[in-house]
Image: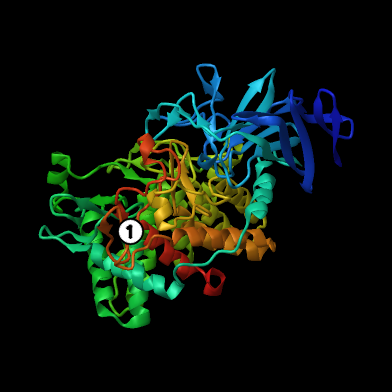
Amino acid sequence: MSLQWKMEKTGARLYAGDALICMIPARENCCDSLEEIGEGAWKWVRKTAAPVTEMKMTLQSAAPLTYWQVPSVNYNGNGWGSGAQYSGFGCDGTPWTYAWHRVAVPACTYSEQGPWGVSLFGEEKGGMSCSIWEEDGCARQALLWPEVEGPKCLSKRCWLEPFQGSMEPADTFTGIIYVCPVEKAGKGYGKMLDFAWKLFERPVMMDWQPEELAKLDTTFFRTMYQARHDGLVGYSMCMHWDERRAQFIRKEEMQIGWVGQNASLSCTLLREYLKTGDEDLRDKAISALDSWVKHASLPNGLFFVSLIAPPDHLDSIDNGTIPTELDACNLGTGALYLLKAGPLAEKAGVPRPEYTKMGLAFCDFAIRAQKKNGEFAKSYFIDGSIDNPHGSVGAFMILPLFEAWKQTGKQEYLDCALKGFQFYNGEFQQNGFTTAGALDSYCIDKESAAPLLRAALQAYHATEDWKYVEAAEDIAHYLDTWTWHYSIEFDEGSPARMLGYDAYGGTSVSAAHNAQDPYAVYYVPEYLELAKLTGKEIYRSRGRAMWYNGIQRISDGSLVIEGRVRPYGSQDESVRHTRWGRTDRRYHVTSGNLVCWMGAFRQVALDMIENWDELR
């Protein structure tokens, strides 16, 4: 059905046939014009009779509100989880306002009213804020100048005072309106995001080629390797700046998945050994994996996910120095790459059947622990009892089950994996979001959707049922809500600007943690595969942009940030692209948390991608 604007004395009204969708109320001393820039899309220009120092452009929906979203910030009110986050429409009766750079599409709000989705957002150059609220049961969406955030401003796990910007007088203000039919309730935003991506899309030039990244990442992995005097061997979780020593030092703690990625990066070193013959890479990988098998495995198939103390488990537990909370992200990731390490060790001429045995033991535990509805727990205690029962992060436990099925052919592993996917995908389809993957916060996030996307395509390859590809597209659209569709012009003198950091293709962490990181490199292979399976080139474009963002700020040994030379191959894990921390810390790079997970994700992705030319 065609959409048509009608200009009336009271303002502009958008109709689909005789049905009113939304309206722009007339404003005194202002002239509004609407230029069609695509199907269902208009550039809304407002001119004032004389320059003004503030402006509010409001779009009113005509039908009752059924769903709404501020991409990467607020999902229908953020009614899940705990901690500081934007909840509901506002605070103490005042609607939230969000700065343009906080939102994945500049100053974007999205609302659904039954069969129609209505979006309002700003231009890439920014300078504005957005707000959405409910009035008489209907959505009200607005763009505001100058930039403001309030009635309070989200920081990391706390609130800042509201921000009130200023601007030079102006007489012209521009917004983008996009309206589309909704085929699935709560999912119409995918069309808006695809339109916004194409509107702001541009070519990207890669800082590093795949071959160069192998050297950068493996060199940093060597730097993080530690064979400790207490018998523990592996890779440090991170390096941080020690002011007293005036250098970056390794943290003693080692983690098998999540931040530490000890299992997956060991597989990377084994693959590099098979390519190069560098025995040091092989030896480091084998010694680390051997240490995890020796010191982390438990009789029930679970294993410690973090090693920070000598390998006398009982003494360590009694002393409280080894965490007994075993989370699904670490467990699933660790088990998956233990299973992959077995065949790699065999090829490397150092057979280690114990790697496969440990991975399969965990999969057997997963079968026993899976609930009747297909759900796993978010985390377990060492005796196998449940610590925290809920969270989409449980989907990480699906991935080693697929690998176990591939290696053994046992149907019980595949059945458990498919049942798990059915639960977590069903939960996502019902809720419209995924949860609890960012283990430093307990809220709506993007990280927990990553294993679900990977599992969807593995389920497709296992069954050849196209419904899994359709599910993968829904999950990918959700992940797109966390992805920056534009570049941010950072403040003069800010570290992000001096480094030339580009937010395009980056992703926000979670509803409670608005900093940007390169986590999307994890699922670049799935985006490239979706492009091939569906024929939709936008997935390839997005995948390239996410890769482009994820390989910025890797040090070649001469990179200096805030006066500190970064080690070769190191990379900060996040950028404060918005207000996050003290108000004067906007646009600052993080303070030097150098971790392995970005390089581990990159090397896993490169191993999965058949044609590297797609990333050049």
Which residue sits furthest left? 229
Which residue sits furthest bottom? 277
In this orientation, which residue lies closer to the viewer: 612 or 551?
A: 551
The structure residue drawn at horizontal position 50% and vertical position 61%, both measured from the top left corner, is: 547
Disc 1: which residue: 596
Q: Quadrant of the N terminus?
A: top right
In this orientation, which residue lies closer to the viewer: 100 or 165?
A: 165
Q: Is residue 485 above or below residue 445?
A: below
In this orientation, which residue lies closer to the viewer: 369 or 541?
A: 541
> For the residue carrying disc 1, how many other residues have a C-alpha within 10 Å: few (<14), some (14-19), or many (20+)?
many
Which residue sits furthest front? 50
Task: Say left or right for 66 vs 77.
Answer: right
The structure residue drawn at horizontal position 59% and vertical position 44%, both measured from the top left corner, is: 105
Q: Is residue 296 above or below residue 88?
A: below
Q: How is the image coloured?
A: rainbow
Task: Say left or right for 422 vs 180.
Answer: left
Disc 1 is placed on an element classified as loop
Residue 73 in sight: yes
The structure residue drawn at horizontal position 56% and vertical position 70%, both measured from the top left corner, is: 614
Residue 364 in sight: no
In this orientation, which residue lies closer to the viewer: 133 or 366?
A: 133
The quarter of the picture where residue 344 lies is bottom left
Task: Say left or right for 583 vs 124.
Answer: left
The structure residue drawn at horizontal position 58% and vertical position 31%, both measured from the top left corner, is: 76
Where is residue 8? Give x, y as percent: 86, 27
The quarter of the picture where residue 537 lies is bottom right
The amino acid at mark 1 is Cys
Where is residue 46? Give x, y as percent: 72, 35
Where is residue 257? Give x, y as percent: 34, 54
Where is residue 229? Give x, y as percent: 10, 60
Task: Say left or right for 10 vs 488.
Answer: right
